[in-house]
Amino acid sequence: MNITELDKKILFELDKDGRAGFSKIARVIGTTPQVVKYHYERLMETGIIKNFWAFIDYDKAGYSFFWGYWLKFSGLTREDEEKMYADFRENKFIPIIMRCDGYADVLLGITGKDLFHHNEVLNSVFAKYGKFIAASDIVVGLGFIKFPRTYLIGKQNESREFSVSGGTKKIVPLSEVDRKILSILQINGRMEFTKIAKILGVSVGLAHKHFNKLVKDQVITKITYTLDYQKIESILYRILFKIVQYDEKRVDDLYDFCAMHPNVINYVKIMGNWQLILDIEIESRKDLRDLIREIKNEFKDIIHQVEINEIYEIDKFTQMAIEYPELMK
């Protein structure tokens, strides 16, 4: 489905602030709140925007163990596959499920409050589905940096804006109300405070107060959205990089390149067989090849290997466990 230039401007503003009101967006892009509302509702009704969610610093929320598992499957029937993914979706300690073509068939993000908890979750996955797993690769998350989608407005990220999850090494004390708000906003990041308050059985003022503190403490660093890439012109690629001959200045140069580039939306520092993940939203495979060629040529002294995954479906994508999923049922 084609999206208009006005749609793109609205999407850009919603990526900057997923809770922005129609009047605020209208002032920025030079139109009326009614026009913004019409286009927003169209983006939601057609499913171009799948959902809004809170980008949370998982370290501050107490989930310091965030590991990624790239899995290749063998012998899965369609029925087995659907049962498996339904099971993954129900597991609140698997906050990331990205189905892909390329290096792997799926990326699972598994989170835990300590190593033992993490292993419990991992063992439960392999106990049920290990017979279908032909190969696996593990990466340990060291920090997740999110850049604005400046490609939507045809510009580079000249201001170097970014939001961060992980790598902060600081746990913020959170109340039960705080954690329930985090669960709600990971499922529906634009939910009105009146509805949040009703679900929690507290006043609107108290719900607002807790939210503001979560933002002030940078537990919530952004409200953004997930797109349905089958309904728009862009494709999402999650790309693995192996860094060799580590040179801090050259790695910083690579970061600066990614921070400025309009199509790089996530920069994920990892440890293991790979050292970096880039999420790239781009119009075509040809455009991706050109970008990867540019990166490999510019940083040939530190990049040893690249593996490309085209993400065709995102079942879940958040940064910590949804601890109270029952609140939204």
Image: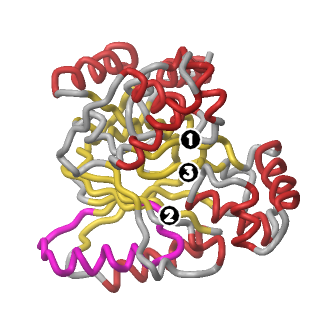
Q: Which SS class for mark 2?
A: strand
- Residue 94 spot, x, y in % from top left: 40, 29
Question: Going by the image, does 141 lie left or right of 214?
Answer: left
Can residue 307 be seen in this snapshot?
no
Q: Quadrant of residue 171?
A: top left
The residue lying toward the viewer, choosing from 285 and 2, is 2
Q: Quadrant of residue 111?
A: top left
The answer to which of marks 2 and 1 sits earlier in the sequence is 2
Decide: few, some or many residues near mark 1? Use Cα within 10 Å; few <14, some 14-19, many ≥20. some
Q: Which SS class for mark 1?
A: strand
The residue where tag 2 is placed is 280
Question: Going by the image, does 50 lie left or right of 113?
Answer: right
The residue where tag 3 is placed is 224
- Residue 78 spot, x, y in % from top left: 61, 23
Residue type, mark 3 in image: Thr
Which range of residues does the magenta coloring cover?
A: 242-266
Residue drawn at x 50%, y 30% as measured from the top left: 206
The residue where tag 1 is placed is 314
Question: Going by the image, does 154 lie left or right of 107?
Answer: right
Disc number lying in front (3 or 1)? 3
Residue drawn at x 71%, y 69% as measured from the top left: 9
Q: Which SS class for mark 3?
A: strand
Q: CA distance from mark 3 to mark 2?
A: 16 Å
The residue lying toward the viewer, choosing from 280 and 133, is 280
- Residue 93 spot, x, y in % from top left: 37, 25
Question: Residue 33 colored magenta?
Answer: no
